[in-house]
């Protein structure tokens, strides 16, 4: 267990609105670029200086406004409020224990892709093991998740969801888990067609040399959402 990280967490940031389990790259060029691109460093818990990039169709802080608060990440267990009677220290201990029971996942690589109207990094190759990992984390920590309120459910526009997605929402608190899970690391908000084309053309040659081949997930991170909506990395656990 990372006692230094837990010490920081319990001493300085104890009132989080929600928690989540994300994949976040280890410190290095990819994490540095992702944090600078989005403008938020979840490890430092502070804004990150944006890179000087020419050719974008809009200012970078506009392009990345939607994903900025989460930091550079791929969601494994979506954000949730703590259930009544559950504490942060208990969650960290359970997260560590769960991580020790799970195996690392090896994938072919990452690539910049389009998901509807936004850009994201998606894994290449067979994602069966990654889906199983995410499902195990969703199940394994669900005891810590507070039940959804009627307002929570309404915000998900259940009438626009498939029957399976509505069932997942009610059972696990989010419609895109288990069979509906699709790992991705969001790089932009929703963009118009021309802006999407231009942003992709600028971003692709910058980030592609930084992407791992093969891509291995050998740790997961517990994040907390502060009162201002920004997410902070609280603890990294090795698989």
Image (spheres, helix red, strand yellow):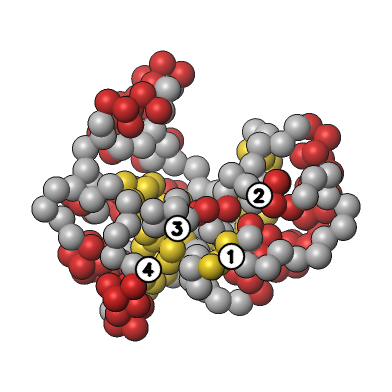
The residue that mark 1 highlights is 47
Q: CA distance from mark 1 to mark 2?
A: 13 Å
**The disc label shown at residue 143, or none:** none
Residue at the limit of the structure toward the top, as seen here? 159
Residue 217 horizontal side relative to residue 124, left or right: left
**Mark 2 = which residue?**
64
Residue at the extreme bottom: 4
Residue in the image at 36% along x and 37% along y: 174
Q: Residue at x 71, y 36 (%)?
A: 191
Task: Name the disc covering residue 234, or none.
Answer: 4
Indicate which disc, 3 or 2, sits on the residue closer to the N terminus: 2
CA neighbours of label 2 inside 10 A, class few (<14), some (14 to 19), many (20+): some
In the displayed structure, does residue 145 sit left or right of residue 211?
A: left
Callouts 3 and 4 close, C-beta under 8 Å? no
User: Mark 2 and 4 residues: CB-CB less than 8 Å, in contact?
Assistant: no
Q: Left or right of 70: which side holds 211?
A: right
Instruction: Out of 106 and 78, give the one closest to the viewer.
Output: 78
Marks 4/1 in contact by CB < 8 Å: the verdict is no
State which quadrant residue 164 falls in. Answer: top left
Q: Quadrant of residue 34?
A: bottom right
Q: Mark 4 vs mark 1: which is more N-terminal?
A: 1
Pointer 3 residue: 231
Q: Pointer 1: residues within 10 angstroms few (<14), some, or many (20+)?
A: some
- Tag 4, which secondary structure? strand
Q: Is 38 left, or right, of 5 in this rendering? A: right
Q: CA distance from mark 3 to mark 1?
A: 11 Å
């Amino acid at each position: 267990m990372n006692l230094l990280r837990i010490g920081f967490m319990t001493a300085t940031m104890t009132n989080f609105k929600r928690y989540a389990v994300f994949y976040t790259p280890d410190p290095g060029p990819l994490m540095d670029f992702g944090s600078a691109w989005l403008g938020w460093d979840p490890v430092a818990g502070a804004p990150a200086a944006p890179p000087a990039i020419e050719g974008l169709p809009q200012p970078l802080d506009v392009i990345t406004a939607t994903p900025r608060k989460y930091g550079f990440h791929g969601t494994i267990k979506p954000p949730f409020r703590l259930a009544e009677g559950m504490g942060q220290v208990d969650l960290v201990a359970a997260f560590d224990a769960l991580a020790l029971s799970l195996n690392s996942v090896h994938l072919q690589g990452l690539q910049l892709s389009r998901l509807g109207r936004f850009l994201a990094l998606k894994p290449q190759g067979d994602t069966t093991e990654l889906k199983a990992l995410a499902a195990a984390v969703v199940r394994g920590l669900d005891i810590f998740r507070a039940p959804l309120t009627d307002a929570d459910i309404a915000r998900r526009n259940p009438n626009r969801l498939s029957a399976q997605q509505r069932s997942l929402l009610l059972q696990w608190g989010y419609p895109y888990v288990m069979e509906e899970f699709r790992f991705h690391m969001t790089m932009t908000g929703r963009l118009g067609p021309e802006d999407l084309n231009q942003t992709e053309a600028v971003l692709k040659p910058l980030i592609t040399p930084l992407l791992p081949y093969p891509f291995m997930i050998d740790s997961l991170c517990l994040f907390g959402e502060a009162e201002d909506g920004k997410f902070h990395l609280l603890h990294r656990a090795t698989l």
